Amino acid sequence: MEKREKILIPLLIIIICFMSYVSTFGLSFEGKERDYYAPAVTGDNISAYKNSCVELNLTKVAEEPEALIGQKVKVTGQLYNKEEYIDFDKTRTHIVLKVPELLSAPYILASYTGTLPFQKGDNITIYGEYVYPSVDTTLQGMEDVGLPCIKAEYIERI
């Protein structure tokens, strides 16, 4: 009986730890949907949301990119690339926005819930929550560079 207890007690401890982890964090090890995406703003809420966003301070981004994390911002630039895919059972769009005023790395990334009718080369304004850093593996030579990112809630062509 003593030999059986030596095996069962550690096994029981492992099972309890695993169940505690799963109940706290779930089975997903990649993060939660809200960590990567914001819900799209639609209808009557668009005007109020746009007014709640401030112009992204590009000087501050270049000097101290972490300082703006969590702020509602807007930024205008040229749609450099977009890629649509399914994630968390929804259509998402990954955007690379070219912003020439950011001289060292003139790109800002954005994640958007939904599809976009805009084409490469269009000038657009992105409204959303600022996050940093993010990495884009499609920009040649910038695979390991931390770039500013916006969890986009509204996007318009200008």
Image (cartoon, rainbow, N blue to C red):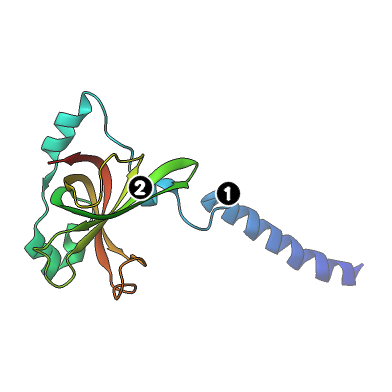
Q: Point out the tag, 1 or 2, that comes first from the N-terminus.
A: 1
Front-lying residue, 71 or 138: 138
Q: Quadrant of residue 49?
A: top left
Q: Nearer the viewer, residue 131 or 91?
A: 91
Residue nearest the observer in this picture, 11 or 77: 77
Q: Position of residue 23 (x, y in %)?
A: 58, 49
Residue at the farthest top position: 44
- What numbered label is drawn on residue 88? none
Residue displayed at 54% across by 53% down? 28
Looking at numbered disc 2 in the image, what kind of residue is underneath it? Thr
Residue sticking out furthest to the right: 1
Disc 1 residue type? Answer: Ser
Above or below: residue 12 compared with residue 103? above
Image quarter (top left, top right, bottom left or bottom right) of the C terminus: top left
Seen at 48% across and 45% down, the residue is 88
Q: Which residue is mark 2?
A: 93
Q: Is residue 10 left or right of residue 1?
A: left
Q: Residues within 10 Å of mark 1 (few under 14, many from 20)?
A: few
Q: Quadrant of the N terminus?
A: bottom right
Residue 5 lies, in percent from the top left, at 84, 67
The secondary element bearing badge 1 is classed as helix
- Nearer the camera: disc 1 or disc 2: 2
Q: Are marks 1 and 2 in contact (CB under 8 Å)?
A: no
Q: Which x, y percent locates residue 153? A: 26, 41
Distance from the alpha carbon under mark 1 to that under mark 2: 31 Å
Residue nearest the viewer, comparing 90 with 24: 90
Describe the element under mark 2 as helix, strand or loop.
strand
- Residue 44 percent coordinates (x, y): 21, 23
122 horizontally vs 42: left or right = left
Could you say which disc has been placed on residue 23 in the image?
1
Q: Residue at x 45, y 49 (%)?
A: 32
